[in-house]
Amino acid sequence: MLTGPIEKPWLANKDKRLGLSNVLVYFIAFLGIAGGAVRCFFTWKSTERLGNLCLVMEDTFDTFDTANTWNHEVTMSGFGNQEFEMTTASSNNSFVQDGKLFLVPTLTSDVIGYDNVLGSPPFTFNLTGCTDANATNCGAVSNATAETVIPPVMSARINTLGHHAIKYGRVEISAKLPRGDWLWPALWMLPVDDAYGPWPRSGEIDIMEARGNGPEYPAQGVDYVRGSLNWGPFSWLNGVSKTFGWWTNRRKTFADGFHTYALEWNDRFLRIYVDSRLTYMLNLKFNEPFFQRGGFPTVVQNGTDFIQTPNPWSNGTKNVAPFDQRFYLIMNVAVGGTNGWFPDGAGGKPWLDGSLTATTDFAKKQSDWYATWPQNVDDRAMVVDSVKMWELC
């Protein structure tokens, strides 16, 4: 150990350059802190705000209110995506327990047997309590020879049509997503009235869509959630590719716990995010007409004729239409489909979108995909803790 006085020659011969370097370091650090504070302030100041909001609906699921809040959609229609599930009003597929709503996919074979799903021998199944106006979507016939099957999955889809809808406001849903290959949970909105024509002319707001496949799935699995807007003059000319985004959870998946999925929307902007405005999936300013935003071709083929591409929103609110109408909420767990949500060739997908036997091909691989579905209902269901809707006052 040192004893006696310690020499410190640097105190006697100070290097002015060293002092100057210290000053520069502190000055640059100060500039960085000040610049960050200024940027945060102006970003906060420029962030769009909704204004005064009035609560129009809140459900914490003490009960399942199917009289005044929720409607079941009971059908085998496939909902335009040629999904592989039928939706039911059965308590096997939707129920409230411990203050939470469960939307659960189950196997049709558990009800009618696997041979009957595949049609060996042919089997007819009629859906109890069907709500579809088209009677052909209320039943199906399986036939192994014709390669037609009964939809191999039963699930649930509920909505607030006729009870609660908003034009501009906020929606907030606390939910935990399901695990399992080819599950497709969604929280989304459709217009009460198709003011601008059939889908997608009148718009669609997707607050959250996801895939139940694991994080190893190459086309964004359950560690990703997506938000988007659908709009376009024709079903095959949809501008969704210009108005979508996603957020990913790098440490866990969105099936590991509850997250808040939110929409904020008025006539100036539309924002979709998960948990915080900082983690937004879509932050869109209404600063140009949607027909212009879409960059659609001037002329399109309609059957055998070529026509000028119509602008469905020419008489709507400038820059906002079709999202200037009242929209209602939908919550569902779909399975598969042929619209491209699950890309061909990714993750061992057991069907091709262009195949005429896509549902049959999926049903025949039941033992493979069902093995990825948790037996614990809490993990296989989309579990919703609360739903809130506000409208601008």
Image (cartoon, grey):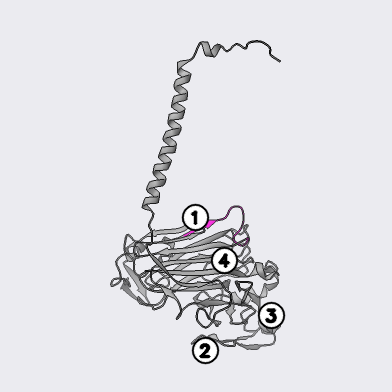
Answer yes or no: is residue 69 visible: yes
In-image side of 5 versus 70 (left or right): right
Region rendered in magenta: 245-256
- Cβ atoms under marks 2 and 3 closer than 8 Å: no
Q: Earlier in the sequence, mark 2 or mark 3?
A: 3
Q: Secondary structure at mark 4?
A: strand
Do residues under tags 3 and 1 come within 8 Å of each other at their CB atoms?
A: no
Alpha-carbon neighbours of circle 4 within 10 Å: few (<14), some, or many (≥20)?
many
Query: Which residue is disc 4 drawn over?
Result: 175
Q: Could you tell me if residue 357 is visible in this image?
A: no
Helix, strand or loop at label 1? It is: loop
User: Residue farthest to the front?
Assistant: 4
Q: Nearer the viewer, mark 2 or mark 1?
A: 1
Residue that mark 1 sits on: 279
Q: Residues within 10 Å of mark 3 (few under 14, many from 20)?
A: some
Horizontally, residue 1 falls left or right of residue 149, namely right
Tell which of 74 and 390 is nearer to you: 390
Q: Amino acid at mark 2?
A: Ala
Which residue type carries mark 3?
A: Ser
Residue under pointer 3:
109
Which mark is nearer the camera, 2 or 4?
Answer: 4
Q: Earlier in the sequence, mark 3 or mark 4?
A: 3
Mark nearer the N terminus (3 vs 1): 3
**Disc 2 to disc 1, C-alpha distance:** 44 Å
Q: Are marks 2 and 1 in contact (CB under 8 Å)?
A: no
Dot 2 or dot 4: first in sequence order is 2
Assign the N terminus to one quadrant of the image: top right
Q: Mark 2 or mark 1: name the one nearer the start of the chain.
A: 2
Give, as a three-letter code, the residue at label 4: Ala
Amino acid at dot 1 = Thr
- Residue 284 is left or right of residue 388, and the answer is left
